[in-house]
């Protein structure tokens, strides 16, 4: 049995009825050798349930209008729905209110917002930013470049053989020079769940801020900013059943209040003269220009869908599938799995098969209609540390089943034998 009603959930996702794959190099004569899609690339992006698509259709068919600009009814309806989406997100992550929720394009933009608005203003020679060896490029490249521009030092907490943070090293690196500790909550390459509460506490002890990259955690488990006490948290709608084009930056109100805007333009101002301007209240101060209105409303619908399942149940389902996949793949001596053991990881498994390039593996799996990711997963330095040019990654979500993992493992086994 599953912690959630997987069959009922699957019925909400039309794409899961598709057949894909087939041996495209030697197609059977008129035969259909495609198979039902096994979608295991959820850490890259998740699929979209009907309720979310319906919310987009409803917006465009019924009340499409620009927000905050019109007195007319459609604009008012769109504005209310857009603003309420902030409240929904605030509730979802335990924030104090919509003032703390800024809609961005994605996690990457949320990172850049803080790096530019806070980092450029606050960092300088003699300061340090502490991050980890397992950061996504969204965080790593952003802090790297901001540190280069400000003269701050960027420090990397090392990982151990199981892909966990070396906490002694963390304690050494986080010191009086540290202004920001920025770390990924769940690694998108290793599946490691980082002790973000502990690290945030360590940051606060030296009067530094903490930035949690929640791109892989917020979609897959209950995340409460109050419990973590993080100063900033970022995540993307498209990894949690919502559309692309919208992400979230959470920030503590007093911090956002103290920061200068990152983008200037319409909607974010209160009063403009030829000489100077003043800024709108939070969160609008950081939302310049026409925002992603339909996407915000659809993110609201996605959160409602997830809350109907219950985030604790989503987490239980992820854990069950991650452990099952880990155990199944771990039976093969020539399969290397990265990251911690199966019973202590997020809902993804990164691995390599000896003698088979991850891209070839992914291509063979595609013939079997199994969609996984292959590459460096936007973690090139981490892959250098692992001594692997690339890895394969299967990642799970609410609609995945054990049978789909069996299909993955069978296809991996076929690939092993093909290259043996
Ligand atoms: N951080 C992590 C841990 C991720 O997995 C991702 C997406 N792969 C990102 C950041 C970036 O997300 P986005 O591309 O939506 O900005």
Image (tube, rainbow, N blue to C red):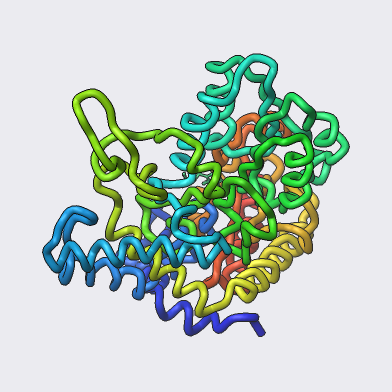
Q: Is residue 415 left or right of residue 292?
A: right
Classify 205 as above or below 239. Answer: above
Q: Is residue 360 left or right of residue 37?
A: right
Q: Nearer the viewer, residue 247 or 30?
A: 247
Q: Position of residue 411 (x, y in %)?
A: 59, 59
Quadrant in which the N terminus is drawn: bottom right
| Residue that protrudes farthest toward the right in the picture | 168
Classify 254 as above or below 150. Answer: below
Q: Nearer the viewer, residue 318 or 75?
A: 75
Q: Position of residue 245 (x, y in %)?
A: 35, 50
Classify 183 as above or below 57. Answer: above
Q: Quadrant of residue 56?
A: bottom left
The residue that appears at 62% across and 66% down in the rendered structure is 222
Q: Position of residue 141 (x, y in %)?
A: 55, 28
The residue that appears at 80% across and 51% down in the rendered structure is 333
Q: Nearer the viewer, residue 281 or 406?
A: 281
| Residue that protrudes farthest toward the left in the picture | 72
């Amino acid at each position: 049995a599953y912690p959630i009603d997987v069959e009922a959930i699957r019925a909400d996702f039309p794409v899961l009825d598709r057949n894909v794959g087939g041996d495209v190099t030697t197609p059977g004569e008129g035969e259909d050798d495609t198979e039902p899609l096994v979608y295991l690339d959820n850490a890259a992006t998740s699929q979209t349930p009907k309720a979310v698509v319906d919310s987009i259709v409803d917006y465009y068919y019924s009340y499409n209008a620009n927000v905050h600009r019109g007195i007319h009814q459609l604009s008012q309806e769109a504005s209310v729905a857009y603003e309420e989406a902030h409240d929904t997100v605030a509730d979802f992550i335990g924030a104090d209110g919509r003032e703390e929720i800024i809609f961005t394009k994605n996690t990457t933009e949320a990172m850049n917002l803080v790096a530019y608005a806070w980092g450029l203003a606050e960092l300088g020679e003699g300061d340090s930013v502490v991050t980890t060896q397992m950061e996504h490029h969204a965080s790593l490249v952003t802090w790297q470049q901001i540190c280069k521009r400000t003269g701050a030092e960027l420090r990397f907490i090392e990982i151990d053989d199981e892909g966990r943070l070396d906490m002694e090293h963390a304690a050494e690196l986080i010191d009086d020079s540290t202004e920001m500790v920025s770390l990924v909550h769940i690694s998108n390459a290793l599946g490691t769940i980082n002790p973000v509460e502990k690290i945030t506490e360590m940051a606060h002890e030296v009067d530094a801020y903490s930035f949690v990259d929640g791109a892989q955690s917020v979609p897959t488990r209950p995340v409460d900013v109050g419990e973590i006490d993080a100063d900033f948290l970022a995540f993307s709608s498209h990894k949690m059943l919502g559309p692309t084009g919208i992400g979230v930056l959470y920030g503590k109100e007093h911090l956002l209040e103290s920061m200068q805007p990152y983008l200037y333009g319409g909607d974010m101002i209160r009063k403009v003269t030829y000489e100077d301007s003043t800024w709108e209240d939070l969160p609008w101060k950081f939302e310049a220009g026409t925002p992603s209105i339909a996407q915000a409303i659809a993110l609201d619908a996605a959160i409602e869908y997830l809350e109907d399942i219950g985030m604790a149940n989503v987490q239980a389902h992820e854990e069950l599938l991650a452990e099952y996949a880990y155990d199944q793949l771990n039976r093969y001596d020539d399969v290397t799995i990265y990251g911690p053991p199966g019973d202590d990881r997020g809902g993804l498994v990164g691995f390599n098969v000896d003698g088979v390039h991850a891209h070839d593996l992914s291509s063979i799996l595609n013939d079997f209609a199994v969609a996984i990711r292959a590459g460096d997963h936007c973690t090139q330095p981490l892959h250098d540390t692992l001594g692997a040019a690339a890895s394969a990654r299967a990642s799970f979500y609410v609609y995945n089943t054990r049978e789909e993992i069996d299909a993955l493992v069978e296809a991996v086994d076929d690939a092993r034998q093909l290259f043996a």
